[in-house]
Image (cartoon, rainbow, N blue to C red):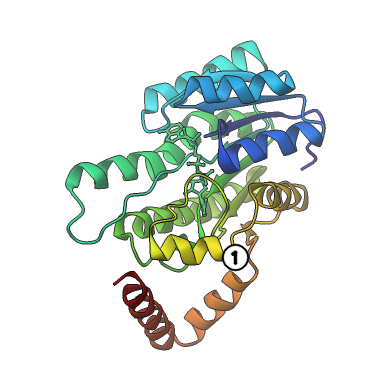
């Protein structure tokens, strides 16, 4: 799908990868980019610099996602490309409190389900569209320090795969973006695992460039860090060896943190 003259929505567009996506869509000639964020002022700051539209939206709430889609379609026009990008993380393992499990499930997974539910039928009726999710390398591998992030990002990838299979032949294009470390406020520089990710983090702009290219090429999996593909190959080739590799990495990070 071409980007020129398209109407685009980016959630979490006020900062980080979302902001970079917004700016890249604008550079490549999108008609209007709607910047949606739970932080309305951040969304407004970005939208103002490029004549876009800012809409406040907490993507964990189905009502607000529906409002974002309805308002965009009523006031801007039919959405061609929807980027379900907003996401959060919590550190922790089996001790993660239920409220955090619920919150991260709602933000990282149900946000995608709500957007698909309210937008994809309209896109299909109009002949198609693109649905893009910013998942993570953790969605195809794992995130050592966070059980909830690993699980929800796997679910994010699983839902994107399901959408692609279900609607790919009816005009919907799906892209699933799976980076490792990206230099945004998301990375916690006091955390040894995030420090490792930060060591060879790429810019949000690079992720945005790769994502728009994937939309144009109608490519499903977007791997801005090519070594994710190597890890995935190792995983399917020898699952136990892959797990041992991550066990070694975890030990290394724990020693570094001690
Ligand atoms: N930065 C990384 O290293 C990295 C790596 C892989 C994947 N990701 C994924 O990329 C996406 C964007 O991350 P980022 O690095 O830009 O993070 P960020 O924290 O820099 O920006 C996230 C933006 O989303 C907004 N947001 C948070 N919760 C929201 C909600 N409930 N509703 C609407 N907006 C909300 C925030 O206000 C913020 O503007 C996330 O899904 C994240 O999981 C990030």
Tell me: 248 left or right of 195: left
Quadrant containing the N terminus in the rendered view: top right
In terms of image quadrants, where is residue 145? Answer: bottom left
Name the residue located 66 percent from the left edge and 15 percent from the top edge: 76
Q: Is mark 1 within 8 Å of ligand 1?
A: no
- In this view, the residue farthest toward the top is 75
Q: Residues within 10 Å of mark 1 (few under 14, many from 20)?
A: few
Residue at 62% in and 35% down: 19
In the image, 198 versus 162, the foreground residue is 198
The answer, for residue 175, to whether it is visible in the render is yes
Image coordinates for residue 56, horizontal then vertical, percent: 48, 20
- Would residue 78 be visible to someone looking at this image? no
Q: Is residue 180 above or below residue 33?
A: below
Quadrant in the rendering for residue 119: top right
In the rendered view of the protein, which quadrant contains the C terminus? bottom left
Residue drawn at x 38%, y 39% is 107
Residue 3 percent coordinates (x, y): 78, 37
Q: Position of residue 188 (x, y in %)?
A: 42, 52
Element assignment for label 1? loop
Q: Pick the residue in front: 20 or 9.
A: 20
Q: Is residue 114 left or right of residue 19?
A: left
In x, y percent, where is residue 244?
A: 37, 85
Q: Which residue is mark 1?
A: 200
Is residue 254 found left or right of 78 in the rendered image?
A: left
Report the number of numbered marks: 1
């Amino acid at each position: 799908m071409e980007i020129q003259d398209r109407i685009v929505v980016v959630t979490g567009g006020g900062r980080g990868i979302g902001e970079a996506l917004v700016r890249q869509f604008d550079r490549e000639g999108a008609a209007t980019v709607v910047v949606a964020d739970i932080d309305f002022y951040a969304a407004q700051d970005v939208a103002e610099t490029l004549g876009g539209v800012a809409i406040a939206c907490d993507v964990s709430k189905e009502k607000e996602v529906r409002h974002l889609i309805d308002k965009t379609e009523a006031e801007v026009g039919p959405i061609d490309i929807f980027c379900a990008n907003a996401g959060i993380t919590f550190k922790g393992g089996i001790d993660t409190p239920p409220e955090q499990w619920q919150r991260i499930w709602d933000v990282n997974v149900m946000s995608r389900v709500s957007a698909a539910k309210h937008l994809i039928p309209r896109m299909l009726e109009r002949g198609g569209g693109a649905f893009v999710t910013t998942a993570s390398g953790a969605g195809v591998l794992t995130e050592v320090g966070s059980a909830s992030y690993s699980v929800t990002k796997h679910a994010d990838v699983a839902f994107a795969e399901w959408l692609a299979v279900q609607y790919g032949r009816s005009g919907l294009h799906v892209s699933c973006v799976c980076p490792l470390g990206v230099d945004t406020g998301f990375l916690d520089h006091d955390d040894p695992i995030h420090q490792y990710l930060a060591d060879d983090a790429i810019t949000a702009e690079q992720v945005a460039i790769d994502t728009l290219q994937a939309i144009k090429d109608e490519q499903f999996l977007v791997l801005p860090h090519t070594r994710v593909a190597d890890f995935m190959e190792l995983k399917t080739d020898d699952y136990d060896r892959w797990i041992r590799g991550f066990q070694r990495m975890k030990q290394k990070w724990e020693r570094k943190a001690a």
